[in-house]
Image: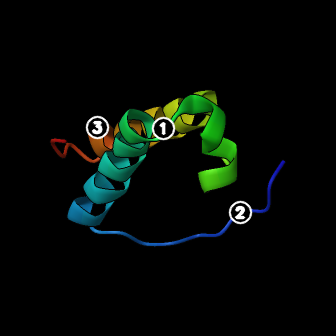
Amino acid sequence: MSDTIDIRLTSDELRYVIACGSAILLNVPADSLPAYCHFSKAQIIEFTTRMRDLLDEAECDI
């Protein structure tokens, strides 16, 4: 498991992180993702899903 870092974000900042992850999937070829951002397509999807769940728990719209 990776080391974790606790950070605080506003809901707008978290929306930005989610949008960037989604944009990377649309604009970078899947085989280039690990070199570009150190995440695979599956990892980006899993991370984005977790972040969306956090917004849902906070009752914030995406």
> What residue sits right under mark 2 in the picture?
4
In-front residue for pair 21/10: 21
Picture layout, residue 44 above or below residue 9: above
Check whether the beta carbons of the residues at disc 1 and disc 3 lie within 8 A of each other: no
Q: Earlier in the sequence, mark 2 or mark 1?
A: 2
In-front residue for pair 51/59: 51
Q: Secondary structure at mark 3?
A: helix
Q: Which mark is residue 56?
A: 3
Q: Position of residue 10 (x, y in %)?
A: 27, 68
**Is 13 displayed left or right of 41 in the figure?**
left
Counting other residues with Cα less than 10 Å from the Cα at mark 3, is it few (<14), some (14-19), or many (20 or more)?
few
Q: Which mark is residue 22?
A: none
In-front residue for pair 39/58: 39
Name which residue lies at 71% across and 62% down. Answer: 4
The amino acid type, in three-letter code, at marker 3 is Asp
Q: Quadrant of residue 49?
A: top left
Counting other residues with Cα less than 10 Å from the Cα at mark 1, is it few (<14), some (14-19), or many (20 or more)?
few
The amino acid type, in three-letter code, at marker 1 is Arg
In three-dimensional space, the C-alpha distance between marks 3 and 2, rounded to whole angstroms, equals: 22 Å
In three-dimensional space, the C-alpha distance between marks 2 and 1, rounded to whole angstroms, equals: 15 Å
> What residue sits right under mark 1 in the picture?
50
Name which residue lies at 53% across and 40% down. Answer: 47
In three-dimensional space, the C-alpha distance between marks 1 and 3, rounded to whole angstroms, equals: 10 Å
Picture layout, residue 51 above or below residue 49: below
Q: Earlier in the sequence, mark 3 or mark 2?
A: 2
Check whether the beta carbons of the residues at disc 3 and disc 2 lie within 8 A of each other: no
Q: Position of residue 42 (x, y in %)?
A: 61, 27
Name which residue lies at 44% across and 36% down. Answer: 25
Q: Secondary structure at mark 2?
A: loop
Q: Position of residue 14 (x, y in %)?
A: 33, 58
Residue lying at the far right of the rendered structure? 1
Q: Quadrant of residue 23?
A: top left
